[in-house]
Image (tube, grey):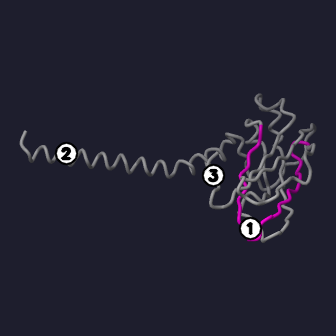
């Protein structure tokens, strides 16, 4: 094999390898967004869905418990104003979480959420939530943050969720620079 043919093969191999590496870099960069979109579309991993309004109550009760956490380096106090509510599927419910900035500087944070058991994510619908946007608290500031939600009545028709009587809605606040993009 002459050197011109060998050089041509090497150049072609190098181009293919560079394309593969570039493709892998793009895939790694997009994976968190794609995973989040998949979770939001399917309710996978306890990701809840957004809705415009509740359909109206149907008979039955589901206990919804509320959990609140902050990333260890975030100097905030964060807690639900009530630990649980009993709701009828389809009934719009409004609850509040309270947050306080314990530091001497303004801090912006974002809440990441999920519900358990994981199978109910597609049936837990949020109409309004502080988790939809970043929250900035001034030094010492306290805020009450509403969550308006409903449990889709279809939860009682799904064989995987028809016997679910308790749901836990959990939030974790992260400083904006450290918010995880995928769970």
Binning the other alpha carbons within 10 Å of mark 1 as few (below 14), some (14 to 19) or many (20 upward) gives some
SS class of the residue under badge 3?
Answer: loop
- Distance from the alpha carbon under mark 3 to that under mark 1: 18 Å
Q: CA distance from mark 2 to mark 3?
A: 41 Å
Q: Residues within 10 Å of mark 3 (few under 14, many from 20)?
A: few
Toward which corner of the image does residue 57 lie, by quadrant? top right
> Which of the 4 image quarters holds residue 90?
top right
- Residue that numbered label 3 is attached to: 180
Q: Are marks 2 and 3 in contact (CB under 8 Å)?
A: no
Q: Residue at x 47, y 48 (%)?
A: 27
* Quadrant showing the C terminus: top right
Counting residues from the start of the chain, the first of labels 1 and 2 encountered is 2
Residue 174 is tagged as: none
The residue carrying pointer 2 sits among few (fewer than 14), some (14 to 19) or many (20 or more) residues within 10 Å by Cα, namely: few
Q: Earlier in the sequence, mark 3 or mark 1?
A: 1
Which numbered dot is residue 136? 1
Indicate the secondary structure of the residue bearing disc 1: strand
Q: Is residue 121 magenta?
A: no
Closer to the N terminus: mark 2 or mark 3? Answer: 2
Q: Is residue 11 left or right of residue 48?
A: left
Which stretch did the figure color magenta? 88-116
Q: Nearer the viewer, residue 94 or 135?
A: 135
């Amino acid at each position: 094999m002459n050197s011109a043919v060998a050089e041509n093969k090497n150049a072609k191999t190098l181009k293919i390898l560079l394309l593969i590496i570039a493709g892998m870099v793009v895939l790694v960069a997009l994976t968190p967004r794609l995973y989040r979109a998949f979770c939001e579309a399917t309710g996978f991993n306890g990701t809840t869905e957004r809705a415009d309004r509740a359909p109206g109550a149907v008979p039955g009760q589901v206990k919804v418990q509320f959990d609140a956490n902050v990333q260890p380096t975030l100097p905030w106090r964060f807690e639900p104003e009530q630990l649980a509510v009993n709701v009828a599927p389809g009934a719009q419910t409004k609850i509040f979480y309270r947050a306080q900035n314990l530091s001497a500087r303004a801090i912006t944070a974002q809440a990441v959420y999920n519900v358990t058991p994981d199978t109910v994510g597609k049936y837990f619908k949020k109409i309004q939530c502080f988790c939809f946007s970043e929250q900035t608290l001034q030094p010492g500031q306290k805020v009450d943050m509403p969550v308006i939600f409903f449990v889709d009545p279809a939860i009682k028709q799904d064989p995987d969720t028809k016997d679910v009587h308790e749901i836990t809605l959990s939030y974790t606040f992260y400083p904006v620079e450290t918010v995880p993009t995928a769970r």
